[in-house]
Image (cartoon, rainbow, N blue to C red):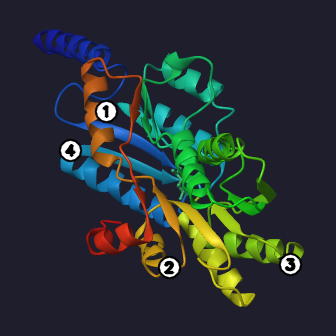
Amino acid sequence: MLKRISALVLAGLTAMSVTACGGGSGGGGGSITMGFSQVGAESGWRTANTKSVQDSARNAGITLKFSDAQQKQENQIKAIRSYIQQKVDIIAFSPVVESGWDTVLKEAKDAKIPVILTDRAVDSKDTSLYKTFLGSDFVEEGKKAGQWLVNEYKDSKDPVNIVELQGTTGSAPANDRKAGFQQVIGADPKFKIIASQTGDFTRAKGKEVMEAFLKSNPDIDVLYAHNDDMGLGAIEAIEGAGKVPGKDIKIITVDAVKDGMQALSDGKINFIVECSPLLGPQLMDLAKKVIKGEQVPARVVTQETTFTQEQAKQVLSSRQY
Ligand code: GYE
């Protein structure tokens, strides 16, 4: 009899704690389990981001279930479904592309497992499908890249021929970095984007596409690459074609990872717009708050700056990633 009562009490308590923490396995108390679906390992930025998430989970005492989607949305959807099945306390992910998330996000919501978007956004109309979005303002980054260019060519009336290496097709940073840049340079018709193609955010593809650009366009003045890695690949292509990166062709990139900053200090890149991958600590703070039922802002924007060649030389040795 006593046994049965205590079993009932226990069951009641468990039910209560499940409600309290929104469907998870005891998140209200000591240990929180987070399922995290990462995009992949395409760039220096991504490597630093993964490390930041893993280190901060450890420091925050959060158990992390981590999976790498290898750039495939279907893998991310599978991972999220498996986190739902495992009844994690919270799901965080960096969506590889913007569209096509409504169904799986609805499944998480129905299972009462809160979701945090990190780094990249989704285009779902229903914003109740996630608690918050932590990451950079990519439109702003594109604008900063455009502003540098406008300033660099302010005294020139000649046409400026630009080639663009876009990030992963359909991803928020590719869409927004393109749009922000276009908004700023579009005000002056001398700026012409003569070729624009995806380089998948990787060095190898950046090099390959730049080689093709160089073959079909003899007169390139500027390269705008949506990340450092593609810019670094393109530098190899430019040098291979017997041209001097940073001089014959001016280069603007985004991220400011160590290798990018090194190339900027060496004069091979002309300007970098910073995008911070160190999202881990803020992500863990937000996760704890969401699980406690505290209000969190719907959007948390990362603080970032820009670097000229001179500025890069000054900070290079202290760069964390
Ligand atoms: O700029 C790029 C990475 O989503 C902000 O993804 C991130 C981007 C970053 O591969 O290097």
Distance from disc 2 to disc 3, alpha carbons, whole Å, reads 24 Å
Within 8 Å of ligand 1, the CB of disc 2?
A: no
Query: Which numbered marker is on residue 60?
Result: 4
Q: Residue 162: x and y, percent?
A: 74, 61
SS for tag 2?
Answer: loop
Mark 1, mark 3: which one is toward the viewer? 3
Looking at the image, residue 111 sits to the left or right of residue 34; the answer is: right
Q: Quadrant of residue 70?
A: bottom right
Distance from disc 1 to disc 4, alpha carbons, whole Å, reads 10 Å
SS for tag 1?
Answer: helix
Mark 1 or mark 4: name the one nearer the start of the chain.
Answer: 4
Query: Which numbered marker is on residue 287?
Result: 1
Residue found 49% across the figure and 39% down from its top? 137
Q: Quadrant of residue 203?
A: bottom right
Q: Is residue 47 above or below residue 187?
A: below
Mark 2 or mark 3: name the one nearer the start of the chain.
Answer: 3
Mark 2, mark 4: which one is toward the viewer? 2
Kind of residue at disc 4: Ala
Residue pointed to by mark 3? 215
Mark 2 or mark 4: name the one nearer the start of the chain.
Answer: 4
Residue found 80% across the figure and 76% down from its top? 214
SS for tag 4?
Answer: helix
Distance from disc 1 to disc 3, alpha carbons, whole Å, reads 49 Å
Label 4 CA crowd tier, 10 Å (few <14, some 14–19, many 20+): some
Kind of residue at disc 2: Gly
